Amino acid sequence: MQTKEIKTIIHEYNSIEELPQEDILVVKKAKKAAQRAYAPYSKFKVGACVLLENGEFIEGNNQENAAYPSGLCAERVAMFYANSKYPDVPVKTIAVCAYVNSKLLDEPVPPCGSCRQVLLESETRFNSPIKVILIGENKISIIDNVKQLLPLSFDNNNFSS
Ligand code: THU
């Protein structure tokens, strides 16, 4: 019997000003995108911004629906749009934030399991790490790649193993 431990490293910052200029831009665009979310049911407005390796920024936000399961999270809206517009360009960074009553949440909001799976597909597809920036008012958490957010993940390598 063997026991294994899987480690996730989270870099925590107190303010976005501590981040490199490029990341600050992604964060600002994610915050703007959240303002345009369509979240009349949860009132939980999420914004995401994807930075591609070609320098393009793609924003997304959550899109809800009266038939609840038909809605989609901000991260997947942004990721699917990015991959549909630039199918051959890897994603470099994604930033995510959430607002309730027009207030940025104090703590960073981690992506749901389905969004992690979609992010992982892109990371695996291009074999290129995606930096994940989770933005809260009091804390910014950065994870260097999606694999660390989804240990023991299922990906296309499992088809042949
Ligand atoms: N939501 C996101 O957009 N991203 C997340 O990471 C978590 C949840 C959305 C889905 C739904 O519109 C609302 O937030 C409440 O769950």
Image (cartoon, rainbow, N blue to C red):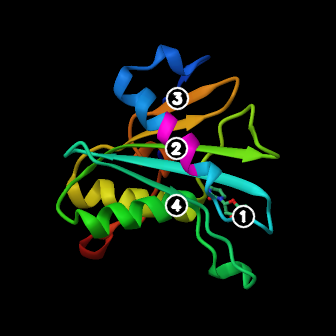
**Nearer to us: label 2 or label 4:** 2
Quarter of the view holding residue 55:
top left
Report how far apart the C-alphas of labels 3 and 1 lie in the structure.
29 Å
Say what secondary structure mark 2 lies in.
Answer: helix
- Amino acid carrying label 4: it is Cys
- The answer to whether the beta carbon of the residue marked 4 is less than 8 Å from any atom of ligand 1 is yes
Say whether marks 2 and 1 touch (CB < 8 Å).
no
Q: Earlier in the sequence, mark 2 or mark 1?
A: 2
Which quadrant of the figure has residue 37?
A: bottom right
Front residue of 36/120: it is 36
N-terminal of the pair, mark 4 or mark 3, is: 3
Q: Which of marks 2 and 4 is nearer the N terminus?
A: 2
- What residue does disc 1 label? 39
The CA span between labels 4 and 1 is: 17 Å
Q: Which mark lies nearer to you, 3 or 2?
A: 2
Q: What residue type is labelled 2?
A: Ala
Q: Which of marks 3 and 2 is nearer the N terminus?
A: 3
Marking on residue 115: 4
Q: How far apart are marks 2 and 4 (CA)?
A: 16 Å
Dot 1 beta carbon under 8 Å from ligand 1: yes
Label 3 or label 1, whichever comes before in sequence order: 3
Nearer-N-terminus badge (4/1): 1
Question: What span is in magenta?
Answer: 28-33
- Mark 1 is surrounded, within 10 Å at the Cα level, by few (under 14), some (14 to 19) or many (20 or more) other residues, namely some
Which of the numbered marks, if any, corresponds to residue 30?
Answer: 2
Confirm whether residue 6 shows in the render.
Answer: no
Q: Is residue 103 left or right of residue 60?
A: right
Q: Position of residue 66 (x, y in %)?
A: 75, 82
